[in-house]
Amino acid sequence: MIVFLNGNYVTKNPAYVWMEVNGIGYEVNISLHTYSKIQTLEKGRLLTYLHIKEDGHSLYGFFDEEERNLFLQLISVSGVGTSTARMMLSSMKPDEISHAIRTDNEVALGRIKGIGPKSAKRLILELKDKLLKTKGEVNLDAVPHNNLENDALNALVSLGIARNAAFVAIQKSVKQEAGLSLEDLIKLTLKNI
């Protein structure tokens, strides 16, 4: 699994970028949302999702975790493929899509190319509860750039703990005790969940 790419943007357009990473070129499909964030940059990092199917592999890139998470939720809905999810993220910002789903706004979703009334209803039915659970979550883009805390967060998420709950518990653990090793931080955080 390719989690992210960090390199130079060789070619950029609203549909894809070519990234050079250590001499290897990757074609990465992007949304207009991501393009608007990287259009003035010469190099950077894109979070990725590798879509594998019978006739080929496609790499999708995202500027932030919010967009990637929403993309993954969208493609989990029956009838919504990667192209449709990318079209949705190009038509509306991730928070606008989430809001439309949480508030049963079929009209807003129906304005997106490829999303008819049935698809809009299915999106709301299948994703509303998931998105309502995360509505009040902490802005995870604000996670400190402390590698220890990031490593602990990633470890807890890989153990199946909800990202938001793990983040809050890590912050509580750090306030309780300073200078913890990664292992001790994870153990203390598990007690705080």
Image: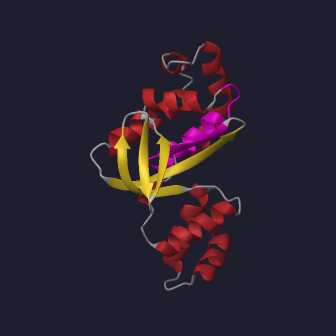
Q: Is residue 1 above or below residue 174?
A: above
The image quadrant of residue 119 is top right
Q: Residue 150 placed where, x, y %?
A: 52, 68
Picture coordinates of residue 33, whole percent (x, y): 40, 37
Residue 139 in sight in this render: no
The answer to which of 29 and 147 lies nearer the viewer is: 29
Depicted 185 relative to depicted 154: above or below? below
User: Does the magenta-highlighted stretch encompass residue 158?
Assistant: no
Q: Is residue 89 visible?
A: yes
The residue lying toward the viewer, choosing from 172 and 12, is: 12
Magenta highlight range: 56-79
Q: Quadrant of the C terminus?
A: bottom right
Report the front residue among 6 and 19: 19
Q: How is the image coloured?
A: secondary structure
The quadrant the N terminus occupies is bottom right
- Asked if residue 57 is among those painted magenta in the image, a careful observer would answer yes
Residue found farthest to the top = 117
Frontmost residue, 69 versus 21: 21
At which x and y percent is residue 143? 45, 62
Kindly identify the residue that appears in the image at 36 percent across and 50 percent down: 9
Q: Where 77 falls versus 22 (above or below)?
A: above
Q: Residue at x 58, y 79 (%)?
A: 182
